[in-house]
Amino acid sequence: MIDLRQEDGLWTVTLNRPDKANSLTAAMLDELTGIAEAATDARALILTGAGKVFSAGADLDEARAGLATSDVWERLSGAIARLPCLTIAALNGTLAGGAMGMALACDLRIAVPGAKFFYPVMKLGFLPQPSDPARLAALVGPARARLILMAGQRIMADEALQFGLVDRIVAPEDLQTAAHDLAADSRAAAPEIAAGIARLCGKPVG
């Protein structure tokens, strides 16, 4: 349910459970975390999904069984955030719930026009993962972070672009090409230069 493709330093990770809106099981999260922890020699990493939804968040059955509060979400987002290469979330559709964390941990987020963004943890009776609110507030500001986390608002792609939650809106048929174009300079750079620039931009590389 997780596809990994490696090509000339580019790692492309695809959530491939489209029949379940790419909802994430514990096994999928463990696999994603393992990939992120192993990608220290990648020149760039693209995270995307199959179908028309990036991810609906936790698998509902497993969420009720405790996955919603597992620390695996935090381990995954931390591993992504620490990668020295450029990381890009190519959001092929709606991003919801705990899946928000992995996208927030990426350096860049591009999305298709119909994507929606929401994180209904308060409604569901859970706290967000510890690093998610700070990363969200760093991108959109504290008030808009509360709009999403406390007011439970669904943000459409154009509003997400205005907020700074996504960096570009791209037609679905151009999404992968756009992600590859963004990764091109990082793939061509010397790894130590890319990592050095990442540190200068405030990324916790290590």
Image (cartoon, grey):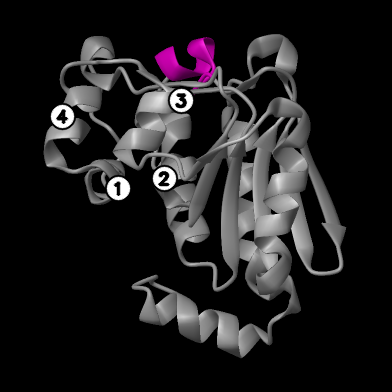
Q: Are marks 2 and 1 in contact (CB under 8 Å)?
A: yes
Q: Quadrant of residue 26?
A: top right
Secondary structure under the numbered disc 2 in the rendered image: helix
Q: Amino acid at mark 4?
A: Arg
Q: Amino acid at mark 2?
A: Leu
Location of residue 11 with respect to 163 vertically, above or below: below
Distance from the alpha carbon under mark 4 to that under mark 1: 12 Å
- Which mark is first along the chain, 1 or 2? 2
Where residue 157 is drawn, which disc sits there?
3
Distance from the alpha carbon under mark 3 to that under mark 2: 15 Å
Q: For this view, does 25 lie left or right of residue 188?
A: left
Q: Amino acid at mark 1?
A: Leu
> Residue visible at 62% across and 34% down?
170
Nearer the viewer's eye, disc 1 or disc 3? 3
- Which mark is first along the chain, 2 or 3? 2
Where residue 61 is drawn, which disc sits there?
none
Where residue 104 is drawn, which disc sits there?
2
Q: Quadrant of residue 182?
A: bottom right
Q: Amino acid at mark 3?
A: Ala
Instruction: Check disc 4 and report the residue beneath it.
Output: 146
Nearer the viewer's eye, disc 2 or disc 1? 1
Residue at the extreme right of the image, as rendered: 7
Instruction: Check disc 1 and report the residue beneath it.
Output: 139
Specify few, some or many for label 2: CA neighbours under 10 Å numbering under 14, 14-19, or 20 or more: many
Specify the segment rendered in magenta: 56-64
Q: Are marks 4 and 1 in contact (CB under 8 Å)?
A: no
